[in-house]
Amino acid sequence: MSESASAETVLRLDGVCKRFGSNTVLDHVSFDIKQHEVVALLGPSGSGKSTLMKCVNLLEQVDDGQIWLSDTDITDPRINMDRARARIGVVFQQFNLFPHMTVLNNVTLAARKVFKWDRAQAEKKAMSLLKRIGMDHKANEYPDRLSGGQQQRVAICRALMTEPELLLLDEITSALDPLLVGEVLDMVAELKDQGATILMATHEMSFAHKAADRIVLLRHGTIAENGTPEDVMDNSSDPETQAFFRSYH
Ligand code: ADP
Ligand code: MG
């Protein structure tokens, strides 16, 4: 699996730079994610985690460097951006679901409109995903009838519809009542067990320690650490890294 030297690289960032005006937000960021790997992207607020994910999802353009999704350079301006985005599932911190649409329509919308699945095919897939998380009985409810945790789990189902090669999860539990964080993290752990490849920005340090294969720690847009949870979270010799993790205790 992820330890194998021959494991396939799903995502490769190579010297990625991103500036907003004079503010350099990503400064030559390079790392890989292998198939089936769960990588936790950690770092203080403002360190560039969301910007990095937006660059991977082509919501922001890089100023320099390349991003490879398997063997496609998705920073090449000639590529089909919709087709590249279709290979990546994304869930944000909040406002993932459209309030005026049922759960089922939320989950099937992109598959039907962007990928042109017919309704029956999309609904069949959506119902099987919802069933897996015990939410099929909520298919015809509107999002405001669901708890925040249920909404985020539905948003993950939507991201899984087209069987993406990579899941980007950007602080998906940060807006939740603490009591609801667990059910969402449990779903992430299940996806990991099923072999998903995941890049997740999070402040849930004990989950990152337990569930991530690797920790990438950003600091002012550069990679401060890239290693196993034990190496980075418990045994780093870098005083700034130690102070960062201490601040969560
Ligand atoms: P994080 O997700 O780690 O909190 P962000 O990627 O959101 O960090 O932000 C990193 C830096 O980029 C911050 O200084 C932020 O103000 C800046 N930034 C993010 N998006 C924009 C934008 N669209 N325009 C200008 N500055 C931005
Ligand atoms: Mg962010």
Image (spheres, grey):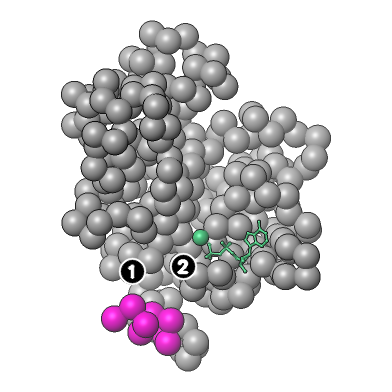
* Residue drawn at the location 65% of the way across and 44% of the way down: 58
Q: Are the two marked residues, 2 and 1, in contact with CB atoms closer than 8 angstroms?
A: yes
Question: To which residue does mark 1 refer?
Answer: 205
The answer to which quarter of the image holds residue 62 is bottom right
Element on which disc 2 rests = strand
Decide if residue 48 is on the left or right side of residue 193. Answer: right
Q: Which residues are magenta?
A: 242-249
Task: Count residues near mark 1 (Cα–Cα under 10 Å), then give few for <14, some for 14-19, many for 20+.
Answer: some
Element on which disc 1 rests = helix
Question: To which residue does mark 2 refer?
Answer: 42
**Vertical position of residue 147 compared to residue 162: above or below:** below
Q: Main secondary structure of the magenta part?
A: helix
- Give whichever of 160, 24 is nearer the camera: 24
Q: Position of residue 97 (x, y in %)?
A: 40, 35
* Residue drawn at the location 24% of the way across and 37% of the way down: 146
The answer to which quarter of the image holds residue 22 is bottom right
Disc 2 from disc 1: Cα separation: 9 Å
Decide if residue 157 is on the left or right side of residue 4. Answer: left
User: Residue type at mark 1?
Assistant: Met
**Residue 241 in magenta?**
no
Decide if residue 91 is on the left or right side of residue 47. Answer: left
**Vertical position of residue 171 compared to residue 45: above or below:** above
Q: Position of residue 196 (x, y in %)?
A: 40, 42
